[in-house]
Each structure stands twice: as structure tokens, then as C-alpha cells.
Image: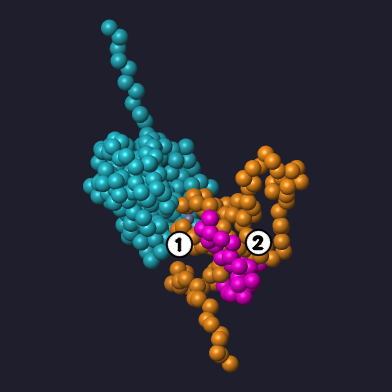
Amino acid sequence: MLLIHCPYCEEERPELEFRNAGEAHIARSTNIAAESDEDFEKFFFIRSNPKGVIFERWRHIHGCARFFNAARDTITDRFLLTYKAGEPKPDLEKLKADGGPAAWANRPPDQLNEKPKAKRSTKGEA
Amino acid sequence: MAKVAIATRQPAHAGKSLGGHGVSLKVLEPASRMSLRARPAAVAALSKAIGVTLPEKPKSSAVKAGRTVLWLGPDEWLVIDEAGGDPIGDCASVKGLHSAVDVSHRNVGIAVIGPNAADTINAGCPQDLSLAAFPVGAASRTVLGKVEMVLLRTGEDAFRLECWRSFSDYVWGFLSEAARDG
Ligand SMILES: [Zn+2]
């Protein structure tokens, strides 16, 4: 079972409490009636469906009930990061560089609630 | 003169109890329940009106004089009053924007008590119910098998489980089987 970190509950919770809610950061037009059919089609139907990191909306439906966003790798199913709705899209390059066991699934139970360590600066190191 | 007909409300599974291996199940007495939604601006006034400080920490609860307030989400609480009070009435005077809905008869409360209580619930609940992860006073909406429930740890070996009335047949059956497996 996947453990997913809910940014509102501030801890990892079992995937059975969550529901996927489609791709994230798809902005709805402020004047949708004026959209061309082509632009509406893009907004409404076309999704990136990447092989690799995708930004998704998730809902902690059987928990705090909040929607939030997640960066997930579609190959490994690893959650790289979750963040509150409304927060900016994180830098994909930085996520890739950080890597690491973001899902924390293999950590010992007593370390499950530890926050990931900040990436150490490599400046000045050999 | 016309006779006055008085309808008696029959709570689902009223009075049921079951003793298993190291765990006992008991359907709890009816209680007043309130679903409360509010933004931070109204939290202080609502706490004062209810008489219990609304918990703001995830997975936590607060209890005072027979009234328990469970954190369900950043702006959502479940208030359970077992002292015959009227939480909805208490909120009526609060000016700040909030939603207080009486859900007293929507839920059935079940006490799960005994050294195998956590194991019995874990038969259908995927959350970590160790004392470290889910200490006394911890409260959470979560799942039991195929249904949603709200779980409150009332003691080291004791839980209060709240499920929707229409799910209570399933929940009672599920817990009974799990208790026997203990
Ligand atoms: Zn949550």
C-alpha cells in the first residue's frame, strides 16, 4: 500500500483514504464563453499524460477531505512531493535533483514523521 | 378528543454488545452530534460558545464535561455531546460565519474496548493505531473495510467508532467477525 503525505494532516496516510482528482495546474479561463473551441478542447480534454513526473490533484477524501497537489513519478508511482492547493508548482528540475525516498515508504516506523532533510549545499566541497 | 401519537425513535442496533477474545463491542447510547465548519476568524467565538476549545492540530480532539470535539479537517469538526446538551443551540449566538448542522441521528457510535481493540479495528482500518502514532485522544476520519468512519481513541485499550447509520449493519458485522478472529 502506498503511503501518501497529506499536507493538511501533516503526516503520511494509507492510500485507501485518498482519491486521485486528475492533473493539477490546469487554469480555467476567466472568460470561458469567449474561448475558441480549440482552446476549450485543450483545457477540457487534453492532458499531458507524461512518462515520468506528473503534477496531480489528489483529495484526502476519507481523511481531512482536502484537495491538494502532488508530484508523482508515473513509472515508479513514487510521490516526490505533496503540497497544499494554491501553492505554486514546484520546480521540476529541483525535484529531480533532490530525488530521494520522498514517499518514505521504506523508513522504519519511528522515523515516519521525520521531515526530509534540506539538501546540503555542495559549495566549497571537493 | 384525538389521541396524541408519540413516535419512539429506535436507534440502529440499540443496546447490542458482544464479547470477543480480548475485545468487547458495544453500541453506544444516542448522543447529540454536530457537524461544524468554520474559518479561523470564527474559531475563538465558537470555542467559547461550545465550552470546548476547538482543536486545531490534525488528528486531535478535545473533551470537556461530556462534550467531545474531534478535528476532522482544517475547517471541520465533529462535536459529540453525551451530556444531554444542545451544541447547535449554543452556536446560534455566534456571529462569525460558520455552519453548524445537527447530525445526531446520522451516526451510530460503537465502543471497541480491550487489549485487542486496535487489532480488531485494524482488521479493516489501514491506519497505524500504535500508541505512538494514534495516542489517547487522537481522532481521525478514515475507513473500515469498504466504508468511511470516524475513529477516536478514548483510552489505551479503548476506541469510539462512529459510522453512518446506514453503514452500521456492515460495521457491526465486520467488527464482530474481527473480534472473533482475535
Ligand atoms: Zn488530510
Q: Position of residue A106 (x, y in %)?
A: 54, 72
Q: Chain of mark 1?
A: A
Query: Pointer 1 and pointer 2: residues touching (CB < 8 Å)?
Result: no
Q: Is the N terminus of chain B in the top left, top right, bottom left or bottom right quadrant? A: top left
**Residue at coordinates 48% horizontally, 40% vertically from top-left?**
B167
**Left or right: residue A72 compared with residue A107:** right
User: Whole-percent x and y of residue A47?
Assistant: 71, 53
Task: Report the chain shown in cyan.
Answer: B
**Dividing the picture into quarters, in which one does residue B37 lie?**
top left
Tell me the amino acid under the disc marked 1: Glu
Q: Describe residue B154's horizontal placement relative to residue A19 as left or right.
A: left
Across the whole image, how many numbered discs are drawn on residues?
2
Q: Which residue is mark 2?
A: A54
**Which residue is outermost to the top?**
B1
The residue that appears at 42% across and 60% down in the rendered structure is: B129
Q: In the displayed structure, would residue B145 be above or below residue B91?
A: below
